[in-house]
Image (cartoon, grey):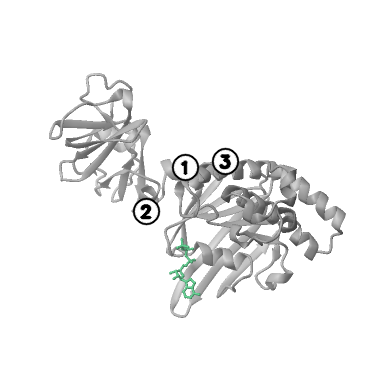
Amino acid sequence: MSEKTILQIAGLYKRFGDFTALHSIDLKVREGEFLAIVGPSGSGKTTLIRLFVGMDEPTDGTIWLRGQRIDTVPANKRPTCMVFQSLALFPHMTVGRNIEFPLKVAGVDPAQRRERALELLDLLRLPREYYAKRIHQCSGGERQRVALARALAFDPEILFFDEPLSALDFRLRKTLEKELKDLHARTGKTFVYITHSLEEAMAMSDRIAIMRAGRFEQIAPADEIYSRPVSRFVAEFMGEVNLFPVRADDDGVIRADGLALDPAVAARLGLHAGEAGTLMVRPENVAMVNRSDAGGAAPEITIGGHLRAEYNLGSRLQYEVEGPSGQRLTVETLRENRFGGAPGDAVTLGWTLDRCHVIHGD
Ligand code: ATP
């Protein structure tokens, strides 16, 4: 991926009557990047894509593609930004005809069209014989590949995807996730991918933009969003998490209800005097410290509680623990580290400072 910006938006607003769907959004997409835009239903993902490709107009703000303003350019005059829609294939036509369609519209001669369609079949790892096959004879996964080949036939500057895999079953979705990531790597194209599946975003993208109520809450690589979220919303959106309110008094003394926190450790949390925050630790970073074989580094932060339940997650086990003020805490461990306690048992949970993160002012 290059450091060059291919797509930039600044101060983008979209209002529908009294309702503001996008609130002054800024974003830079890098050339060759795979950017996933993730957010709950109604957060504004589709609205944003519609503005990018000219299916709708912003109320305010600017969109540039390679430094050229495009928000004032009508959709049919914009450099090609393709929205990938698998359902838009022509079912009665052959695979070849479908892929060639954009080339035909562009006036490319038949022999060249065919050659390009065959190359695209190769690129999507579909047998060349599929050229003559009809769409209704193709499986769901094959149709997705044909649709991708057709989208690439436009030779778009950027390929936008709006939940392309949401209607597919689990196995096919997993296969296509890998194929899309691979396709991205092989074409070097810029992909902007909308989904409300965090798993999909994590599996494929270089960066994830988390949307919430018409704003970007955080834009960063998946690992960073997972380990160092900027808000409770992002922390919880990214999966199971334990959150503890923490506060530094005006004299700098750290208060964290229920947590056993040595002052020397507390001082390293990075809270300023008078500041409030949230200490976050993911379940897989928490250990049951009263296990005889707890192992690992000595915990620097601990909390007592009572075991409530054990859940089997397949390769991992999850424990639900009730904290001192009745809060629900979660611990995850590999099967081989099974705790084996019974509901009601007193337990102590612990972790090291480098395994947790403080969300400031949240
Ligand atoms: P989903 O994941 O459910 O597709 P989304 O994040 O794509 O959701 P959008 O479709 O962008 O969300 O919608 C954002 C908000 O804007 C929603 O509250 C929606 O009801 C509203 N909205 C979208 N289009 C219109 C419209 N044409 N008129 C009025 N409100 C609209």
- Provide residue 30's location: percent of width, then percent of height: 64, 51
Q: How far apart are the two marked residues, 3 and 2, measured between alpha carbons?
A: 28 Å
* Quarter of the image that includes the N terminus: top right
Q: Amino acid at mark 3?
A: Lys
Characterize the local packing of mark 3: few (<14), some (14-19) or many (20 or more) Cα atoms within 10 angstroms. Answer: some
Mark 2 or mark 1, earlier in chain? 1
Horizontally, residue 203 falls left or right of residue 188, namely: left
* Residue highlighted by disc 1: 224
Residue 71, above or below 247: below
189 relative position to 333: left or right = right
Please tell me whether residue 293 is drawn above or below residue 169 in the rendered image. Answer: above
State the CA–CA distance, disc 3 to disc 1.
21 Å
User: In the image, is the residue at mark 2 within 8 Å of ligand 1 by its beta carbon?
Assistant: no
Mark 2, residue position:
233
Q: What residue is disc 3 on?
A: 178
Mark 2 or mark 3, which is nearer the start of the sequence?
3
Q: Nearer the viewer, residue 93 or 274?
A: 93
| 223 horizontally vs 139: left or right | left
At label 2, the amino acid type is: Phe
Mark 3 or mark 2, which is nearer to you? 3
Q: Position of residue 83 (x, y in %)?
A: 62, 60
Disc nearer the start of the sequence (3/1) = 3
Can residue 221 be seen here? no
